[in-house]
Image (tube, rainbow, N blue to C red):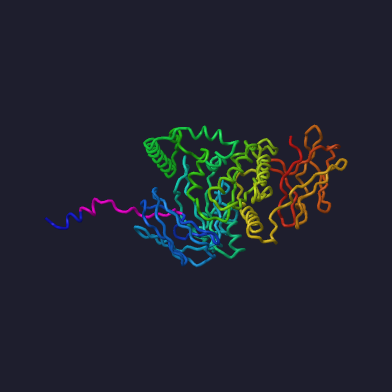
Amino acid sequence: MNPRLPFLACLLFSPLPAAVTLAPVFSDGAVLQREKPVPIWGSADPGERVSVSFAGQTLATTAGPDGRWRIDLAPLSASATGRDLVVQGADTHTIRDVVVGEVWLASGQSNMRWPLAYSTDAKAEIRAADFPLLRQFKVGEQSARDPSPRAEGAWIKAVPETAGRFSGVAYYFGLSLHQELGVPVGILNSAVGGTAIAAWIAPDAYRATPELAPAYAKFDQTPRPTPEELAAYQTLRTEWEKARTDAKTARTPFKTPAPKAPRGIAGNRTPGGLYNGMIAPLVPGALRGVIWYQGEADASHAGRYPVRFAALISGWREQFAQGDLPFYWVQLPNFDHAGKNDTSWHWAELREAQTQTLAVANTGQAVTIDVGEAKNLHPKNKKPVGQRLARLALARTYGHADVIDTGPVFKTATREGDAYRVTFEPSPSPLQSAEAGLTGFELAGEDKVFHPAEARIEGSAVIVRSASVASPAALRYAYRNAPDAGLFNQAGLPAVPFRTDTW
C-alpha cells in the first residue's frame, strides 16, 4: 500500500479553511475616507485570524462565531498615490491602487441614477474627462427583507472610457469637490429608478418612528418565502429575463408577463427593501456625507414625506455611526405633469415637504426650480444640479466661507395696503431678477383664488401686488408644478419656493 495514501485522503476529505472575503467596496481602485477611522470588514472561518496592512499600519483580529470580522484603520491623511491594501488570513488578498480622500454616498431614484452618458453635452464632457482620482463604485441593484452583508460592484475612474457610466449628478458633484479640495473623491452610487422613499428607510428607523412603527410591524409579520420558493422564483425570473433579452436582440415582440414573485419577497417598493439590499452592505463604511435626489415617486403622498424623510436620515446616521453625517438633497425641479401647471400633481407640496425637512440638523437643499424640463421627468442638465450640491458641501462641510450655497430664503411677508413686503434671510448675495423678469409671484384674497402678481425688488425686499386682488390674504412664490420662477440672487441661485397660506 502506498504510504502516502492516508495523507492524501486526509487532504481530500478534511475541511479546508474558507477563503477570507472582503466587502466588495474594498476592491481595486477603492477610495478610503481621510481623517476618520476606516473600518475594513469581511468574512472568514469562525475564529480565523485576519490581518490588514495599509499605509504603514498592520492590524489583526479574529473572525467572530458568525464568521464576520472587522478592523478599523487609524485615520489616514489624503493621498493621491495608489497603494496596496493587503488582507491576510487563510489566504491573501491584495487590493491595488487604493487612494485616500473624500467619500460620499449618492442615493435616490432615477434622476440620481441617470448616467453622465445621457446628460447634456455628454460627448464633450466624457471626451474631456481626465480625472483618474475621481472614482465611482456603483452598487448592484438588489432588494432584501433583512440587511444584506454584500452588494456587488466595482470601482471605475472618471476617464473617457468609463466616465459615461457615472451618475451625472454625482459626477459633477464629485468633480467640483475634487477640483476645489485637491484630493481624491469616491462616490458610492446606490440609486434605483422609480423607487419611493419607503424602500430606502432602515428597518430600525421604522421601528423607532411612532408614526411609522405600527404599519411596519404589520408588514414585518408577513411570512418570508422559503429557500425553495426563492430558488424556484429566481430560476423563472432568470429564464424570463433571458427570453426578454433574446426578443429584444431579435427585434421581435415580447409580451410575456414577468413571473409572479412569492408572497413576502422583497422588491423595490418593499419597506426597507432597498436599504437592506443596497445601503446596509456599505455599513459601517467611513463616509464624509450623503447626497440624495428622490421624491418624484412620492409626490402623491407629499403630506407624509417629511416624517419619512426625517426617519431615513436619522436611520442612516444611526447605522453608519459617524454622528450627524452631512445630508444634502436636490429639491424637485419644475415639471408640468399632464399639461397641468398647477398644484394638482403635488410637486409643489413635495418641494415644500423637502424644505420642511431642513429642520433636521446638518442638512441642506439644492434648489433646481430653474433647470428642469417642464415636459421631461428626467431633465438632462445635471451639471448645475451636481454643482449646487457641491456648493452646500464646500460651504457647510468643508468650511469655505466664500461659497454662496443657497438662493434667497423666505423670512417674512408683511401686508402693506394692497401689497406684501417680502423679506429674506440675510445673505451676502443681493436679490436679482431673471432676465425675463420677476415672475412666479401670486396673490389671493379671502376667496382663496390666486392671481398672477407684479413684483419689484426694493433693496433687500420684494414688493408684490396684483391688480386683481385689492385685499390680499395670501402670497405664493413658485408654488406650482412648473412655475416660471424669476427670483435669484447675484450668485445665480434661485429662491426657495414658498407660500404664506396653509390652504
Q: Which of the image's four quarters has the C terminus?
A: top right
Q: Is residue 54 depicted above or below 405 in this figure?
A: below
Q: Residue 374 versus residue 79: which sits nearer the camera?
A: 79
| For residue 302, side relative to residue 146 (left or right) | right
Q: Which of the image's four quarters has the N terminus?
A: bottom left
| For residue 34, side relative to residue 441 (left or right) | left
Q: Is residue 216 magenta?
A: no
Residue at point 61% right, 48% down? 379
How far across and down, in percent of the image, does residue 100 sit? Answer: 52, 63
Residue 11 image-quadrant placement:
bottom left
Q: Is residue 281 depicted above or below 404 in this figure?
A: above
| For residue 441, side relative to residue 84 (left or right) | right
Q: Residue 423 versus residue 384: which sits nearer the camera?
A: 423
Q: Furthest-left residue in view?
A: 1
Q: Residue 17 versus residue 46: which sits nearer the camera?
A: 46
Residue 248 image-quadrant placement:
top left
Q: Is residue 11 magenta?
A: yes
How far across and down, in percent of the image, does residue 84 sit? Answer: 44, 64
Q: Which residues are magenta?
A: 9-24
Q: Is residue 320 depicted above or below 55 in this figure?
A: above
